[in-house]
Image (cartoon, coloured by chain):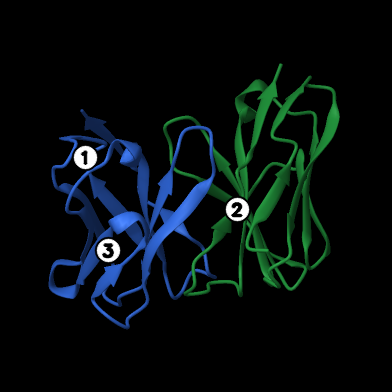
Amino acid sequence: AQSVTQLGSHVSVSEGALVLLRCNYSSSVPPYLFWYVQYPNQGLQLLLKYTSAATLVKGINGFEAEFKKSETSFHLTKPSAHMSDAAEYFCAVTPYNQGGKLIFGQGTELSVKP
Amino acid sequence: DTEVTQTPKHLVMGMTNKKSLKCEQHMGHRAMYWYKQKAKKPPELMFVYSYEKLSINESVPSRFSPECPNSSLLNLHLHALQPEDSALYLCASSQEQGSSYGYTFGSGTRLTVV
């Protein structure tokens, strides 16, 4: 079955530093890929999505992700972290053959130090 | 309107109570979803409705009963719940089931079963 692996359950960066959150998927056929952010006590907000158009995807709040088929990866980056970026980040996949389910990785909690 | 609205935001219920969670969207989306999220965990799919018909039931116990009265409204009826059912219940919608556009999530209902 299709799965998503997020490396690192917790990432801590300093304000202004590069943010890199890692996501790998398992599939021979590239699925639809998404990054969602969840702030405390809130729902999930879509940051960006890959749907086979461009491999470098730009999202909201300065985030972007690069789809690399050879590495089955879809890592999320932001050049300069802001305190307001502190949240839980989920990588998710919609496999072609599972009835449209959105399957989430385990999540990465991002902390930003002043 | 680009939102999914969930009510109530918080709910405390006893194990013998009957209550309902409500979800509404006016984006013309034809697929709607219920997810359950425990603390520090990713959301887990419970039900999928497509064009007002139940499409996926992820082997959810019968004490959870979904209902889709029309294309804009999704309910989750709760009866005889257990304390372990305490969680954040998230509703989501998408243009179609398995859409490449991603899901729009509501802010959730925080349920506590006592």
Q: Nearer the viewer, residue B33 or B64?
A: B33
Amino acid type, callout 3: Ser
Amino acid type, callout 1: Gly
Q: Are marks 2 and 3 in contact (CB under 8 Å)?
A: no
Q: Position of residue A85 (x, y in %)?
A: 32, 42
Same subunit: marks 2 and 3: no
Q: Nearer the viewer, residue A89 or A18?
A: A18
What is the crowding at mark 3: few (fewer than 14 residues within 10 Å), some, or many (at least 20)?
Answer: some
In the figure, residue B11 lies in which quadrant?
Answer: top right
Q: Chain of mark 2?
A: B
Looking at the image, which residue is at 61% across and 73% down? B95
Q: Is residue A70 above or below residue A19?
A: below
Q: Is residue A111 left or right of residue B25?
A: left
Which mark is on residue A8?
A: 1
Distance between mark 2 and mark 1 Cα atoms: 28 Å
Q: On the image, numbered disc 2 is attached to which residue?
A: B58
Q: On the image, numbered disc 3 is attached to which residue?
A: A26
Q: Nearer the viewer, residue B74 or A97?
A: B74
Distance between mark 2 and mark 3 Cα atoms: 21 Å
Looking at the image, which residue is at 53% across and 39% down? A42
Indicate the chain coloured blue by its letter.
Answer: A
What is the crowding at mark 2: few (fewer than 14 residues within 10 Å), some, or many (at least 20)?
Answer: few
The local secondary structure at tag 1 comes to loop
Q: Is residue A42 left or right of residue A26?
A: right
In the figure, residue B85 lies in which quadrant?
Answer: top right
Q: Position of residue A90 (x, y in %)?
A: 37, 49
Q: Are marks 3 and 1 in contact (CB under 8 Å)?
A: no
Q: Position of residue A87 (x, y in %)?
A: 37, 38
